[in-house]
Amino acid sequence: MPRTTAPDEIRQQYDAHGEGGGIGEYLLHRAKPHLPPWLASAGTGLASLPAHYFWSGEAGVTAGLTLASVALTGLTWWAGKSTTQQRRLHSAVTVAAASTWFTAAAIAGPGAGPLGELYFIGAPALALSWNIRQVLRKNVEGPAAGADGGFLEKVGLAKTQVLRTEVGPNKAAFDLQLPRGELTPDDVSKNLTRIAGALDVPKTAIRIQENPDSASRVMLTVVPLDLLKNTVPCPGPSAPGESISSPVVVGIYEDGTPAVMWFPGDPDESRNAMMLLLMGMTGSGKSEGGLTALAEILTRRDVIVWASDPAKKEQTLGPLLPAIDWAALDMPSTKAMIKALTAVIPARTAWLAKYGYKQWVPACAETQADGAPGMPYLVAWFEEAAKTIREIDDDVFTGLAQEARSAGVSLVLSMQRASGNQVSTDTRASLGSSWCHGVRTEQDARFALDDEVLDAGAAPHVWKDKKPGYSYLVANGVPDDQWATPMRDYLSSVDYLNWVVITFDDIRAAIDPVTAGAAARSADRAFTGRNLYPMPGTTDQPETDMPNVYGPDEEDDYYPGGDDYDMRRPHGTDEDDDYEEGEFIDAEQELPEVEQVVHLAARPPADEPRPKISTAEARAAMEEVLEEFEDEGRDVVGPADFMEYCDRYGRGRSWVSGQVAQFVIAGRLAETSEVGRYRIVPYQAAA
């Protein structure tokens, strides 16, 4: 049981005895714990009088008292082996001095020679020494050391002192002073499991934080009860309609405080824009936490979101798609989005420099002094980023993360395991923030969390997939002492996500001309023809800008109505027709008389069979085609340029793409900065 403080004890005694108890009763109460040594000293002196009366002059009694004195001293030393060395020695010296004086007083008399002076000097000195020890035990060794007979010694932290204690409803923090030169904070980290076992709590309930001003002091925090075990529904937007510069609330820490993250940087706080690694194994709740963060972002007035998920497509992002400016749900669209970002970042940086901004601030989203439209913040969110990295390049995000900070862009990569086989060291270093959910092993945790966070007690590998939504947030703006504090993500239902999409549609920012122009010039139809998903509750299909994939001359031949033909209206109607889609037609009604007969062309002849040539002959033919391209003066080609020759060689698209790859390996083609395009290398250079 924890001891009450002195004011509490005074108040308890005052209440117990009433106002009329007086000072005398209070002083008696305070003196009681210190009386036993004095009573023992007085008893020893009084007992020497009858002992001398009955035993003086008895030789046998003298020998017996001497043996008893030695035996009591030895027994005290033996019995004190389970206590501290200081207590053992103090007890043995006290018993030896008292028994020796009693033996001499019983034989010669208490007043013989110097025995009287020794008693009146030695007895008070011994009693006071025990009183002093009692006071020091309460104030210096602290509750952790004295409550259970040396708790800190049991867990390998001998000589450690508790300087200060803070106790809350479900949290206790101890400021530990380690013995200088003997123990370090690393020694405390290594003993976290022993401390947790001694306190009978899980390892994740124990954390330490080093003192920045002293390497010999640490703060030990114990949270005995898991207050996060129940699902925490999202309570709603934390800053609806405000700027994305306000903190984004994504969950709750175990002590009840909200878990927040900041996306834009803040020059006043010396905080950079956030580049985030979101990691967690299957079943850890990583995607649900990401949806909560995205929903919170989409309630702000000055931010747009580009999101990619080439693996799960609409399965994860589905409810939020109507509010996302660009959703890339396949690999070609994702590649185009990455290509667009490489062009968007310098364009946005140039715009910020033009108007005197060193980095994005909320004023950037407002109309500028010259009447130019503002530029909202951009969050580029890549779900299942490991698939994207495998398909493109393991360093594809490194440059983006390094350059996006000053362009008002935050990059978020979400994956199950950011191992070295999937993410390069440079990319992980560029992502300065991490949001780590349950992982399979401690090695996996090190891909997202620094060693100092793990040493402080963070252990996502203990959760694995058994505690969905549990996570650690190590991000710009989050205090260091919360990095190793477990949190639980808010859980957002589909109904809540739909409500966010609908409710904040009017205040949500539209893409700015600078970002849109750079994306259109870089990604072309992949951006201009991106899907616009319908609002929840409607049955409309996703709208598209209908990109022309056939070219200006082919379009009129392919579409019956040429430029004026509208695929969303039935063929043969125009704006003035009374036709309404879905109008009822009576099947029993007689057909109108024939006014005109249209003769259809005969069916085109069947395709001629492909010529059958060997693989070696087909490869030689591909070499000839490449030489033809070179003779024509072409510098850059791609698989699409070879497609028209497929029928000539009796080969399909995949085979042709494979041959192009062989040309790259052989050095006849070299990669360019444009995806799917290769530079022709002359034979001499290739050799």
Image: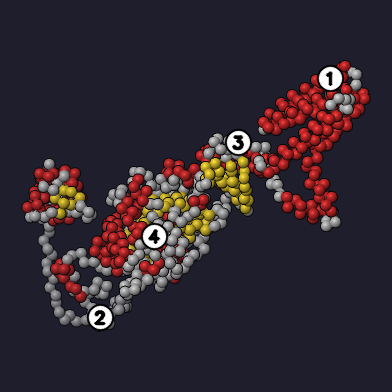
Disc 2 to disc 4: CB gap under 8 Å: no
Q: Secondary structure at mark 2?
A: loop
State the CA–CA distance, disc 3 to disc 1.
41 Å
Q: Amino acid at mark 2?
A: Glu
Q: Could you say where residue 174 lies in the image, as x and y percent from the top left?
A: 60, 46
Between discs 2 and 4, the one toward the N terminus: 4
Label at residue 64: 1
CA distance for labels 4 and 1: 92 Å
Mark 3 or mark 1: whose residue is earlier in sequence: 1
Q: Earlier in the sequence, mark 3 or mark 2?
A: 3
> Disc 4 on helix, strand or loop?
helix
Mark 1 vs 2, N-terminal side: 1
Q: What residue type is disc 1 on?
A: Gly
**Residue 635: image x %, image y %?**
13, 54
| Local secondary structure at mark 3 | loop
Q: Is residue 316 visible?
A: no
Query: CA separation, marks 4 and 3?
Result: 54 Å
Q: How would you rate the neighbour count of disc 1 (Cα within 10 Å): few for under 14, some for 14-19, many for 20 or more?
A: few
Disc number lying in front (3 or 2): 3
Please provide percent x and percent y for residue 405.
Answer: 36, 57
Mark 2 packing: few (<14 Cα in 10 Å), some, or many (20+)?
Answer: few
Residues at marks 3 and 2 touching, judged by CB atoms closer than 8 Å: no
For label 2, the residue is: 575
Instruction: State the residue position of label 4.
Output: 317
Q: Which mark is residue 415?
A: none
Lower position in the chain sequence, tag 4 or tag 3? 3
Residue 158 disc label: 3
Q: Quadrant of residue 549?
A: bottom left
User: Residue at 31% across / 72% down in the picture?
Assistant: 372
The amino acid beneath tag 4 is Leu
Q: Is residue 576 visible?
A: yes
